[in-house]
Amino acid sequence: MRSARLTVQANGITQAVRVAGPPDGVPVLLVHGNVSSSAFWEPLLARLPETLRVVAPDLRGYGETDTAPVDATRGLDDFADDVAALLDAPGLFAPGARPVVAGHSLGGGVAMRLLVGHPERVAALLLEAPVSPYGFGGTRDLDGTPTTPDFAGTGAGGANPDFVARLAAGDRSADGPTSPRAVLRAAYVADPASLGDDEDLLLESMLTTATGDDNYPGTAVASPHWPGTAAGPRGVLNALAPAHFRLADELVAVPVKPPVTWVRGDADVIVSDTSLFDLAYLGRLGVVPGWPGEAECPPQPMVEQTRAVLDRYAAAGGTYREVVLPGCGHSPHLERPAEFVAELLALAGENATG
């Protein structure tokens, strides 16, 4: 399957979109993750059948879409509203389409938010290594109880400043662990060899990330709690923080409950119960000094939280499957594409007449 690039005016911004397949094909919407773009789906598209109509947008501040600001106080709603506007944009899907929505990482949070806001327009969800329904960082219990009143340690203040600077500078080297190429190899996948000939494509996708207070990583505010920062009101990492993104109860309560498939790797170092991007876990390891201890600031059980919420979703009338890929990291669609495609096609087949 080969894609074409379109530019669409939707939700007040210019959005760049990859499209593939016939307009009347089974609709599939692909939502990329943080520090990437729709180009991250390009290796997958080559494996998909021509019976699908695939639409993959660049989110705001990524790829070729406008560098519009992200209001973090809305959680991921700015992104979800942009994507929702594409459902009825001319030339993308057939009128009234109900796509299978696949979201990777941050995109999984956007997909969940899309379901909450527009449940009648989603045929199924494929959540690939998704952010917890309680956000990223700062929550310790399965019900999303905050570690501290202001969710200290989450948001833009937790970003590595050297990594941000290298993104802004367009660094293509492998010089040092905070270069984007090194992060791609070490964090986005478990086995760097799985990137193959697509490594440079994926790196260029990462380097399209708009940096700054309104985009990645956003603004940080001081906190009296360890490690001294909390989520600010602007930017991507703050939009992911539990202070602003918490939709567990809304997800469970949606009146229309499409099937959900949750695909994750058991070697994921980003979205994990032992995440190397969780300051509390790094504190436990002694990497970040001053950690106040397990009782006050335990690592976030991201995987357990997602499972607990999806169990509630099932108990309320929905269905879900958890697919765990051994030895796979944060990007199953890149590392284990055959298994990922099988799960996507199973959902598309279930809903081909929906």
Image: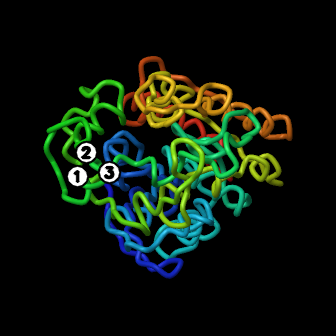
Residue 353 in the figure: left or right of residue 101: right
Badges 2 and 3: C-beta atoms under 8 Å apart?
no
Q: Which mark is residue 85?
A: none
Residue 6 in the figure: left or right of residue 180: right
Residue 34 in the figure: left or right of residue 83: left
Badges 2 and 1: C-beta atoms under 8 Å apart?
yes
For the point 50% across and 36% down, which residue is it? 278
Residue 13 in the figure: left or right of residue 11: left
> What amino acid type should be assigned to the residue bearing mark 2?
Pro
Helix, strand or loop at label 3? It is helix
Image location of residue 129, percent across then percent down: 52, 37
Q: Residues within 10 Å of mark 3 (few under 14, many from 20)?
A: few
Q: Which mark is residue 180?
A: 2
Helix, strand or loop at label 2? It is helix
User: What residue is pinned by disc 3?
Assistant: 161
User: Disc 3 or 1, which lies upstream in sequence?
Assistant: 3
Looking at the rendered image, the disc whose residue lies closer to the viewer, 3 or 1, is 3
Image location of residue 221, percent across then percent down: 52, 60
Helix, strand or loop at label 1? It is helix
For the point 49% across and 33% down, which residue is it? 290
Q: Which mark is residue 166?
A: 1
Residue 236 versus residue 345: which sits nearer the camera? 236
Image location of residue 39, percent across then percent down: 32, 53
